[in-house]
Image (tube, helix red, strand yellow):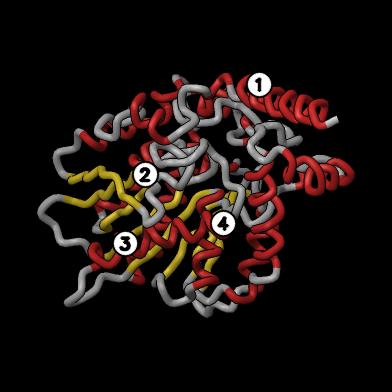
Amino acid sequence: MLYQTACVAGLGYVTNVAARWYLNRPISEILSGDQRRWKHPIEKPIGPGAEAVLASKDLTVRRQMLSLKDGTQIFYQTIQRKSVAPTHVLVYLHGYTSQSDLYLEPMSRFAREGALVLMFDLPCHGRSDGLLTFVPDWWAFIDQIWEVIDLLVPSLRGSSKPLPVFAAGMSLGGGITACLAVQRPTFFNGVVLIAPMLCVADDIKPPWIVQQIFKIILAPLLPTWPITPTKSMDGFDFRVVEQGERYVRTNPLSMQGLKSRLGTAMSFGFIFPDWMETKLKEVKTPLLILHGTGDKVTDPEVSKRLYNEAAAKDKSIKLLEGAYHCELFCCLPGNSKLIGMDWLPEQIQVTETAIEEIRTWTAKRA
């Protein structure tokens, strides 16, 4: 009996390992931070937009690795205008299955206007350590993000006359930014939420019964498996479906179209949203929310609710008519070259409007 039990356990283990290997085949060479950094060294930019920024004569870009207390290596970069004293620090947090190089182009705009920009690849994203996009514990994830901020921001803002510090986040990064603002209401002088992931839109949720099976059985049993039963979000990122498909394929550090890992989906789809829903009234930090009314990935109605319920006395919301999820920050020349497609004029206008809203809002508070 003992022998049979051991055989069954061994077979189950081998089957599990083989299944995980099979499911992760499209990203087998970028699963770990070491692999991702080997294929894409930190000194080499990813994408035409990042290449242009690093080649700029008027900007200084520093790209380094930071070691956290548990040994986790985090890739970060700072951008500022040469020979010009910055007026404020701007911390930028990217979205799910993304990485900071994809946002060097828009963030360079703020650097040229006086910001000292800090960007870093979130844990288990980009060139930072961790199994690609595996976030089994939302609060451990947030603790690591705070550790990065606490290690880097004080020296950036200075001590004799500290610079004001703002945070901005896109999608998942927007949800993280909202979470940080609740946890430490006075740490940032203001926060900007761009199409924030405050909850998962109904359009990409599976039926209720599937959700229950997922929460009770699948996520605890197979947390690393990229088989979350949701609709593909690639076609929801831009109003032209092919743009979204190309955007995913041309980011070499993305999940390449694979589903979310079950443990990650539990954190992003249930743990954080359930908590955040009870904390909307506790957002006291000065707040700017930008959201497209055509967004099918994150819900603009939840952004409206946050705006209405937030305790912040200084709060603004800008709803961009018809705009899709990624159009708020991605429709720039570098990304057009990256995907090999032109943006529509209305898409370009959405991105330019969002950038100008952020620039104006932070400038008034810096």
Q: Residue at x 81, y 32 (%)?
A: 2
How packed mark 4 is, by other alpha carbons closer than 10 Å (few <14, some 14-19, many 20 or more), is many
Name the front one of labels 1 and 2: 1
Marked residue nearer the N-terminal end (2 or 4) = 2
**Is there a contact, CB below 8 Å, between mark 1 and mark 2?**
no
Q: Amino acid at mark 4?
A: Gly
Residue hosting label 4: 175
Q: Amino acid at mark 1?
A: Ala
Give the Cα separation between the discs numbered 1 and 2.
41 Å
Marked residue nearer the N-terminal end (3 or 1) = 1
Marked residue nearer the N-terminal end (2 or 3) = 2
Give the Cα separation between the discs numbered 2 and 4.
19 Å
193 versus 109 height, above or below: below
Name the front one of labels 3 and 1: 1
Residue 18 tag number = 1
Marked residue nearer the N-terminal end (1 or 2) = 1
Residue hosting label 3: 151
How packed mark 1 is, by other alpha carbons closer than 10 Å (few <14, some 14-19, many 20 or more), is few
User: Where on the picture, by quarter, is residue 210?
Assistant: top right
139 versus 295 height, above or below: below
Residue hosting label 2: 106
Give the Cα separation between the discs numbered 3 and 4.
21 Å
**Is there a contact, CB below 8 Å, between mark 2 and mark 4?**
no
Give the Cα separation between the discs numbered 4 and 1.
34 Å
Marked residue nearer the N-terminal end (3 or 4) = 3
Give the Cα separation between the discs numbered 2 and 3.
24 Å
